[in-house]
Amino acid sequence: MRSDVNSQCNGACGVCGIARNIYAYVKAWLDYGTDNDMHSNDSAAPPQVNNCFLPDAAALSNVNFGFDKVSWNSPQIVTILTFGMGSN
């Protein structure tokens, strides 16, 4: 999974990174494929999560990660590899 959060976007989230813009743009790919480079350009596939929103003042001050699995009474092993954070 890869997720990107862009701040300072215009209302349509077509342009981000300009100080006077106040919207946030969140994109996530659930299966990012074989490209494990966190600094590469977006995946060729469109993101499965694609949301433009007006955050409250504290919304982007923290980043929280959560992991969940569903087993339905059968044991499962979850392995997380190549977990990283980056900023461009």
Image (cartoon, helix red, strand yellow):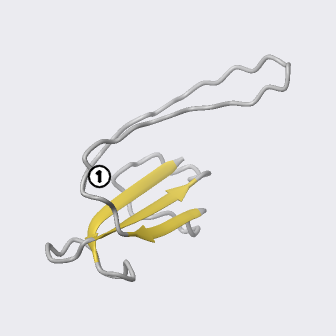
Residue at label 1? 60
Using the image, determine if residue 2 lies above or below residue 47.
above
Q: Nearer the viewer, residue 34 or 5?
A: 5
Pick out the residue farthest to the front: 56
In percent of the image, x 33 and y 53: which residue is there?
A: 39
Residue type (three-letter) at the residue carrying disc 1: Leu
User: Which type of secondary structure does the marked residue at label 1 adopt?
Assistant: loop
Q: Quadrant of residue 54?
A: bottom left
Displayed quadrant of residue 78: top right
Q: Is residue 65 above or below residue 27?
A: above
Using the image, determine if residue 70 lies above or below residue 76. below
Residue 69 image point, x, y percent: 68, 30
Q: What x and y, as percent, mark residue 2?
A: 48, 50
User: Position of 3 compared to 34: left or right?
Assistant: left
Residue 34 x/y as whole percent: 56, 49
Q: Residue at x 39, y 38 (%)?
A: 64
